Amino acid sequence: MRSAAPAPGEEPILAELAAAGYEARSLADLRHSGLRYRDGVAVLLDWLQRVTDRRVKEEIVRALAVPWAKPAAARPMIGEFRRVDVSVDPTGTGLRWTIGNALDVLADDSVFEDLVELACDRRYGKARQMIVLGLGKSRRPEVIEVLLGLVDDPDVDGHVVKALGKLKAPAARPALARKLGDQRAWVRGEARKALARLPQ
C-alpha cells in the first residue's frame, strides 16, 4: 500500500504516538498499519479535543474508529458530534458524518440514550445515518420503537431499514413491507433482505 503523507498539523500527534511506541508517517498510515495501537488511543483522544483543523480532526476520528478504542472513545466522540460547527459541515456529510461512522464502531448500550438523542435530532441530517445503523446492534428492547419512529425520515430511512433487518423484529414487518415500494432500488433491496430475516 502506498504510504500517505501527513496532513499539515499531524506532526506533533505523530511524535507523541511514536513516543508511545507507534511510529507512522501519517495518521492514515497508522490506521492501515494493522497495529492494534491500544496505548495510542489516549494520545488520539487528547488531540481530538485540542485540534481545530478539520482535516486533522477527521484523520483522528478515523484512527479512533477501531474496536480497541472502546469504551474510552465513545463519549468523547458523541461530544465531538454535537460540537461540529454547521458552517463547517452544512450538509452533514463531512466531519459530522465521519464522527457518526466512528460511533457505529465505538458505541454500545452504555451510551444508548445519547445515540437515540442524536439519531432523533433532525437538525443533524444525513450525519445520523451511521448512528442509526449502529442502533441495529442494540440489545435494548425500546430500540425497535425508536427506529420505527425514524423509518419515514428521508435522511436516514434506508439505514433504518438496514438496522431493523439486523434486529429481526416481527413488529417491523409492516414498515419494512411499505419500503418495498420505495423509489430507491437499494432501499427496496434492503427491505427485501430485512423481511427475509424475520421469523415466519
Image: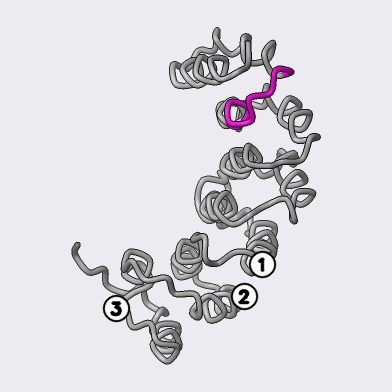
Label pair 1/2, CB-CB below 8 angstroms:
yes
The residue wearing badge 1 is: 76
The Cα atoms of the two marked residues, 1 and 2, are separated by 8 Å
Of badges 1 and 2, nearer the viewer stands 1
- As drawn, is 82 to the left or to the right of 55? right
Q: Type of residue at label 3?
A: Arg
Q: Which residues are magenta?
A: 163-171
Real-space CA distance between mark 1 and mark 3, rounded to the nearest whole angstrom: 25 Å
Give the class, few, some or many, for how many residues have Cα within 10 Å of label 2's Cα (few <14, many ≥20): few
Q: Quadrant of the C terminus?
A: top right
Q: Secondary structure at mark 2?
A: helix
Front label number (3 vs 2): 3
The residue tagged 2 is: 49
How far is the residue under mark 3 from the one under mark 2? 22 Å
Question: In the orientation shown, which residue stands out farthest toward the front?
Answer: 200
Q: Earlier in the sequence, mark 3 or mark 2?
A: 3
For label 3, the residue is: 25
Q: Answer with left or right where residue 137 lies relative to residue 143.
A: left
- Residue type at tag 2: Gln
* Percent coordinates x, y for residue 167 in the rendering: 64, 30
Q: Amino acid at mark 1?
A: Pro
Pick the residue in front: 139 or 47: 139
What is the quadrant of residue 42 in the picture?
bottom right
Q: Are marks 3 and 2 in contact (CB under 8 Å)?
A: no
How many discs mark residues in the rendered view?
Answer: 3
Location of the N terminus (image quadrant): bottom left
Q: Residue at x 45, y 88 (%)?
A: 20
Residue shown at 63% from the left, 39% from the top: 132
